Structures are given as C-alpha cells and as structure tokens.
Image (spheres, rainbow, N blue to C red):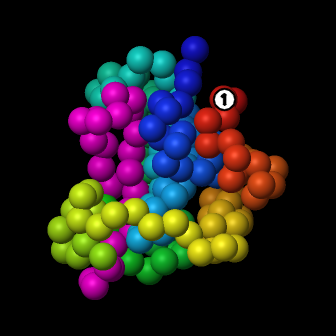
Amino acid sequence: MFQLHPQLQDSTVALGQFKLSLVLLSKDANYPWCVLVPKRSGIREIHHLSEQDQQQLIRESSHLSEVMTSMFAPVTMNIAALGNIVPQLHLHHVARFEGDAAWPASVWGVKAPIEYEPGALAHRVERLCASLVGEGFEALSTVEDADSSAGFTP
C-alpha cells in the first residue's frame, strides 16, 4: 500500500492529487517549489514505473510546469527526480529566477529553508489549487486540510 515518505510529509504541504501523483508544495519559501509523488509503492526511479504510468507522470509534470510558469513567470523550471536521500520516487518542480537565493546553482544546500510568512502559505495553496484544475487534478477541500495533511493517502 502506498505511503508518503516521512521526510516528504514533514517538508511539504499537500495540495491534492492527479490520477497518478500526489501534488505537494515545499514548505521552503525561498522558491516556488512543488513535488509530484506517484502513488505507487516501492518505486524509486521513473524507469521502474509501467510505461503507462511513465506517460501519465510526464502529462502531470507538464501540466504542473505550465501552471507554475504561468503563475510565477520564472526564467526556467528546474525539474528533477533525485533519490539520494528520500528513497521514494518524487519529481521536484522549482521555478527559478535570476537573483533567487541559489541562482544559478542548484537549490539544494545553498540556503537554509525559510518558512512562509503568515497567510502567504494559504494564499499560495489557494492560487496553485485553483490554477491546477484540469488534467484530473483534485484539490483538497480546504487550505487547513492542505496545511495539516501532507501525508494523506487517497
């Protein structure tokens, strides 16, 4: 049975889900940063997914990237599946800007994570959920649910 890895649960807020993947928002306010986690047990790499799931993941990733590009107007989207620390397949989507906290380097280990200002997290969750509608996205029912249930299991 699928369960979200504890480190992902602790470092993110659940926005909702697509057909295949959970959609999470990183709690690090340094960057607009979302994570897709395919709801498949024991999967660490994209090539471990079935061909159908691989295609679905690309569709979901593309939709998320388009939404984030539209919302944040970044210079580029960094998309990465790193499994060095968390042994569960998860695909990072980070909107990058010239002059952001890590530009042009990778976001990992450059600057300590910072928390969202009061109200800013709820605002970002609401905007992302409203913008992600389509492509089979199902948002959580309330922002409070998102803030308290990153580990929800569909």
Quadrant of the image containing the N terminus? top right
* Residue 3 visible in image: yes
Q: How many marks?
A: 1
Give the residue drawn at x 64%, y 52%: 15
Asked if residue 60 is positioned above or below residue 97 in the image, the reply reads above
Residue tagged by mark 1? Answer: 153
Residue 72 screen position, x and y as percent: 48, 77
Q: Determine the residue located farthest toward the right in the rendered image.
A: 141
Q: Which type of secondary structure does the marked residue at label 1 adopt?
A: loop
Q: Is residue 8 magenta?
A: no
Quadrant of the image containing the C terminus? top right
Q: Determine the residue located farthest toward the top in the rendered image.
A: 1
Residue 69 screen position, x and y as percent: 46, 72
Instruction: Determine whether, in the image, residue 4 is placed left or right of residue 30.
Output: right
Give the residue drawn at x 25%, y 72%: 102
Give the residue drawn at x 40%, y 63%: 113
Asked if residue 25 is positioned above or below residue 10 in the image, the reply reads below
Instruction: Determine whether, in the image, residue 70 is placed left or right of residue 89.
Output: right
Asked if residue 17 is positioned above or below residue 89 in the image, the reply reads below
Residue 42 screen position, x and y as percent: 41, 17
Residue kind at label 1, given as amino acid type: Thr
The span shown in magenta is: 79-100
Instruction: Determine whether, in the image, residue 4 is placed left or right of residue 86.
Output: right
